[in-house]
Each structure stands twice: as C-alpha cells, then as structure tokens.
Image: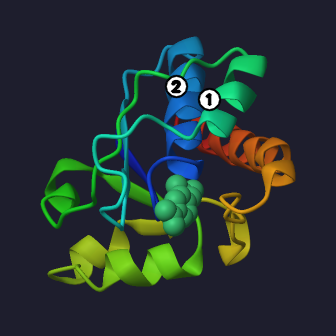
C-alpha cells in the first residue's frame, strides 16, 4: 500500500500523519510506503514546524528529518490512497485529478469528512491534532492489514 498524507503547508499536520503512519505500519509489520505533501508551495524544502516536531517527539515519533514538498498530479500515479486533512485540501487535490480513478483515491483522513483543524495559528491545537491524526492512522492500519 502506498499512502500520501496531504495538508496545506506540509509542515504541521501531514508530517505528523506521515510519521505516525510510518511508525504504526512498521509496528504492525506492514510493508507500506508513506509520504506527505502540501497543496501550497510556501514550505517546500522546509523541516516540519517545531511545534509538530516537539509534539511528535513527546509521543516517541521523530519527524525532524522530513522536508516539505508540494502535491503534484503525478502523485495520483505514485500512490494508492491520498488522505487529506480538511475540505480545502480535498478541493485543491481533487481539482488536479485527471479522471475518476484519480478522484477515487482521495479521502478525508477522518471519518465522515470531519476535518483535522489547522494548528498553524494556535499552539494549543498541536496536542489534540496529534491525537486525532493518531486515532485515524490506527484505524487505517487496523483496517488494511
Ligand atoms: P499545515 O499547516 O497545512 O498543517 O502544514 C499550515 C502551515 C503553514 C501555513 C498554513 C497552514 N502557512 O500559511 O504558511
């Protein structure tokens, strides 16, 4: 299974999702390829936000070596499932779909199209965002193994 996690900047939410999913997949012996990307290009080449790095480290996940990159249509070919954090990510990714098969790969990370809030402007959101993402990644790993 090849999974791509997508948010806006690829420095707060999707690096957390990538790091958590990698760790869960490894713990469950799943040979999955996991990556993350942002719909925007402001943080290409940047490390994750220090608040995400810190929250992940607290939970035993090291995301410090990840670097930002922008989502591109070729990602529809490279990945089986694309998980987005919120509705605006969904719209930005689906807009780039070339056909129905591309579009069918795009899912909200949370069930019922709930959104993972953007923590960029609120330090207090990083801990709850970590929990939301962790629970969703656990569900994915449990369902697909
Ligand atoms: P992310 O958070 O989409 O979870 O990585 C953001 C990071 C940067 C910005 C917005 C959201 N920004 O405006 O630069």
Up/down of 68 relative to 104, above or below: above
Please state if 37 lies on the left or on the right of 56 as rendered: left
Foreground pick, 25 / 16: 16
Q: Residue at x 87, y 50 (%)?
A: 124
Report the disc number at residue 53.
1
Please rate how many residues cluster around mark 1, counting C-alpha atoms within 10 Å: few if below 14, some from 14 to 19, many from 20. many
**Between marks 1 and 2, how big is the CA–CA gap?**
6 Å
Up/down of 77 relative to 55, above or below: below
Q: Residue at x 35, y 73 (%)?
A: 104
Query: What is the quadrant of the N terminus in the image?
Result: top left
Please rate how many residues cluster around mark 2, counting C-alpha atoms within 10 Å: few if below 14, some from 14 to 19, many from 20. many
Foreground pick, 90 / 9: 9
Please state if 128 lies on the left or on the right of 46 as rendered: right
N-terminal-most mark, 1 or 2 = 1
- Cβ–Cβ below 8 Å for labels 1 and 2? yes
Q: Quadrant of residue 110?
A: bottom right
Residue 131: x and y in percent read: 80, 42
Beta carbon at label 1 within 8 Å of ligand 1: no
Residue 15: x and y in percent read: 50, 40
Foreground pick, 15 / 98: 15
Residue 13: x and y in percent read: 59, 50
Please count the marks in the image. 2
Residue 121: x and y in percent read: 71, 63
Q: Secondary structure at mark 1?
A: helix
Q: Secondary structure at mark 2?
A: loop
Report whether residue 118 is seen: yes
Up/down of 61 relative to 112, above or below: above
Q: Quadrant of residue 41?
A: bottom left
Circle 2 is placed at which residue position?
Answer: 63
Report the disc number at residue 123.
none
Q: Residue at x 15, y 57 (%)?
A: 77
Q: Residue at x 44, y 51 (%)?
A: 10
């Amino acid at each position: 299974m090849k999974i791509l996690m997508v948010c806006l900047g690829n420095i707060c939410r999707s690096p957390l999702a990538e790091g958590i999913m990698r760790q869960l997949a490894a713990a469950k012996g799943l040979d999955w390829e996991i990556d993350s990307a942002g719909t925007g290009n402001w943080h290409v080449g940047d490390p994750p936000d220090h608040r995400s790095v810190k929250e992940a480290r607290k939970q035993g996940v090291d995301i410090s070596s990840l670097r930002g990159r922008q989502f591109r249509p070729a990602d529809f070919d490279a990945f089986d499932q694309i998980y987005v954090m919120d509705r605006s990510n969904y719209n930005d990714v689906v807009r780039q779909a070339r056909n129905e098969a591309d579009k069918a790969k795009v899912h909200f990370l949370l069930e019922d199209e709930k959104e993972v809030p953007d923590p960029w402007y609120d330090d207090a959101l990083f801990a709850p965002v970590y929990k939301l993402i962790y629970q969703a990644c656990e569900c994915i790993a449990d369902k697909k193994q």
